[in-house]
């Protein structure tokens, strides 16, 4: 096994782990949870010729997308990675399970990778930066491909003992993270059962499986991956961050506001990523509603002074 250390702090814990076993897991995860949903989506589209999609399938896709994005955007990202608010144990469990249903990796691994990304954003060591391949059209395409797909089977694994020690110490969350496959299966079974019951047929169950399950995993996966790729190349950069993160309005709605990415890199611990009234941020809307219900509290938001201090003089938006 090869381990990497930060040479500037030689006594710190191992930050990156590289071995053949982990590389094998990356390949397996890519084929099962990225490539197979892609094939399933193609099957679903082909099936439209003889299995038209109705309100039930559209409704299940939207509801399952919203629940899964809540788990990833609000749970995995804003709560577990950046601690942008506090909440009860029940909500912590719900966030952990809903995020796991996305099929983007176990909670602890997801958080470790994202914290590593912020530590090394657009610098060597960033797991999925599109900006480390020089300039030029073809280099840009290569960078986008790496940050969207390629890195999934070719990145150093951030050591959870360094990046997520508090999650490893949490027995409940550690157990949820270990049962990752169970949550994915449940996320496929639920729309399958609902589709079968509402249509009262095996065809209905198949459509529920495809649209509420497989297609939903494919869409959510690529929506989130677009933040890694598109939002580090295209868009505006109004705040000083030391990287090339961008605010991209084109994918703000499907990403639950995650694509206001420069805002996020400027104020990592903010529960709100859309910082202006017109910057749609469904993720923060969920946090706001939960706060009004008393289910979350101590919600972090940047002050006007903080925002002004990081604002680039010649604003681009």
Image (cartoon, helix red, strand yellow):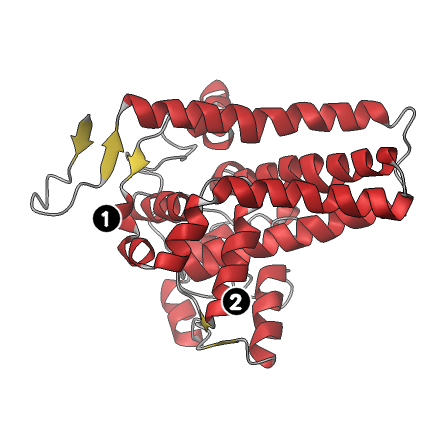
Considering only order in the chain, which callout, 2 or 1, is on the residue closer to the N terminus?
2
Secondary structure beneath label 2: helix
In this orientation, which residue lies closer to the viewer: 298 or 250?
A: 298
Residue 61, horizontal then vertical, whole percent: 75, 45
- Few, some or many residues within 10 Å of mark 1 (<14, 14–19, 20+): some
- Residue 191 is left or right of residue 305, and the answer is right
Residue 317 shows in this picture: no
Please say if 38 is above or below 265: above
Q: Which of 315 and 52 is in front in this view?
A: 52
The x and y percentages for residue 76 are 47, 54
Q: Do the residues labelled 1 and 2 touch (CB within 8 Å)?
A: no
Q: Is residue 162 found left or right of 52 in the rendered image? A: left
Q: Position of residue 150 (x, y in %)?
A: 46, 25
User: Quarter-wise, where is residue 291 in the image?
Assistant: bottom right
Q: Which of marks 1 and 2 is in front?
A: 2
Q: Which residue is drawn at 47% across and 59% down?
A: 78
Of the 4 image quadrants, the one containing the C terminus is bottom right
Callout 2: few (<14), some (14-19), or many (20+) C-alpha neighbours within 10 Å?
Answer: some
The residue that appears at 84% across and 25% down in the rendered structure is: 47
| Quarter occupied by the N terminus | top left
Using the rendered image of the protein, determine whether residue 310 is visible from the camera's viewpoint: yes
* Residue 298 vs residue 258, the one in the foreground: 298
Q: Residue 91 carries which label?
A: 2
Could you tell me how far apart the alpha carbons at marks 1 and 2 are, in whole angstroms?
25 Å
Residue at 42% over, 45% down: 178
Query: Label 1, on which residue?
Result: 162
| On screen, residue 222 above or below 67 | above
Q: What element carries label 1?
A: helix
């Amino acid at each position: 096994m090869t381990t990497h250390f930060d040479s500037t702090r030689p006594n710190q814990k191992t930050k990156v782990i590289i071995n053949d076993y982990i590389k094998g897991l990356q390949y397996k995860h890519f084929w099962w949870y990225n490539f197979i949903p892609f094939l399933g989506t193609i099957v679903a589209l082909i099936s439209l010729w003889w299995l038209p999609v109705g309100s039930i399938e559209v409704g299940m896709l939207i509801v399952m997308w919203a629940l899964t994005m809540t788990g990833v955007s609000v749970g995995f990202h804003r709560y577990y990675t950046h601690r942008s608010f506090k909440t009860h144990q029940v909500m912590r469990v719900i966030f952990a399970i809903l995020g796991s249903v996305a099929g983007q990796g176990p909670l602890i691994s997801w958080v470790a990778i994202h914290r590593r990304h912020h530590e090394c954003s657009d610098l060597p060591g960033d797991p999925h930066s599109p900006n480390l391949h020089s300039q030029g059209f073809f280099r840009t395409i290569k960078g986008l491909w790496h940050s969207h797909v390629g890195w999934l089977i070719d990145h150093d694994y951030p050591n959870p003992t360094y990046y997520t020690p508090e999650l490893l110490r949490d027995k409940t969350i550690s157990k949820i993270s270990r049962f990752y496959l169970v949550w994915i299966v449940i996320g496929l079974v639920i729309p399958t059962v609902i589709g079968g019951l509402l249509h009262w047929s095996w065809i209905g169950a198949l459509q529920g499986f495809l649209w509420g399950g497989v297609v939903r995993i494919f869409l959510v996966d690529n929506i989130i991956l677009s933040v890694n790729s598109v939002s580090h190349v295209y868009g505006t950069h109004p705040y000083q961050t030391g990287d090339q993160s961008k605010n991209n309005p084109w994918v703000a709605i499907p990403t639950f506001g995650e694509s206001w990415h420069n805002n996020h890199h400027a104020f990592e611990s903010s529960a709100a990523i859309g910082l202006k009234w017109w910057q749609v941020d469904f993720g923060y809307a969920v946090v706001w509603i939960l706060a009004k219900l008393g289910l979350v509290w101590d919600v972090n938001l940047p002050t006007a002074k903080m925002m002004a201090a990081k604002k680039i003089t010649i604003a681009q938006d």
